[in-house]
Amino acid sequence: MSYQGEGLQVMPAVREYFSLCLRLIIAFGVVFELPVAMVFVAKTGVVDAKKLAAGRKYALLAAFVIAAVVTPTPDVVNQLLMAVPLVLLYEIGIVAVRLFGRKHFIGFEPD
């Protein structure tokens, strides 16, 4: 920021602007891969939809902690803009695990 004339005028450096944009693009890119990662972990048999649904309150807490760390400012609006999609994608992931997770057949027990 720099001081010019009568007041404080916001003059961000190009490096800071691109750093912020790159950080947010990477963060949102990783967040939107959450349902795919959840299905992959469910396919390996580590978790199932019931376990993910039971851990919903911890996922909600983790979403807000991650959003607080990733967002550039400490205000609530930016944190909500990151946390709400994360929570919604977690719920979409639970539905995707129910649909595409490991299937158990009658008379077949996985190793």
Image: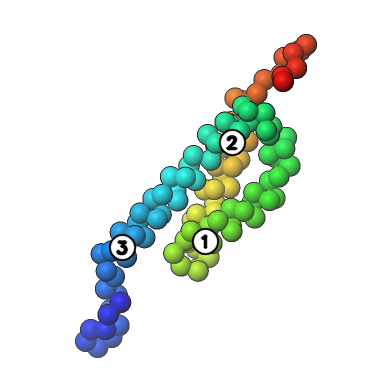
Tag 3: residue type? Tyr
Q: Which residue occupies 68% across, 39% down?
A: 52
Determine which residue is flagged by label 1: 69
Residue most extreme to the top: 107
- How far across and down, in percent of the image, does residue 111 sit? 72, 20
Residue most extreme to the bottom: 6
Which of the numbered marks, if any, corresponds to residue 52?
none
Of callouts 1 and 3, the N-terminal one? 3
Q: Which residue occupies 50% across, 69% down?
A: 74
Q: Is residue 86 above or below residue 52?
A: below
- Label 2 to label 3: alpha-carbon separation: 32 Å
From the image, which quarter does the N terminus lie in?
A: bottom left
Asked whether, in this view, residue 16 is left or right of residue 51, the answer is left
Determine which residue is flagged by label 2: 38
Q: Secondary structure at mark 3?
A: helix
Tag 1: residue type? Val
Of callouts 2 and 3, the N-terminal one? 3
Which of the numbered marks, if any, corresponds to residue 17?
3
Asked whether, in this view, residue 36 is left or right of residue 95, the answer is left
Q: Secondary structure at mark 2?
A: helix
- How far across and down, in percent of the image, does residue 56 sit? 68, 46
Of callouts 2 and 1, the N-terminal one? 2
- Cβ atoms at labels 2 and 3 below 8 Å apart: no
- Cβ atoms at labels 2 and 1 below 8 Å apart: no
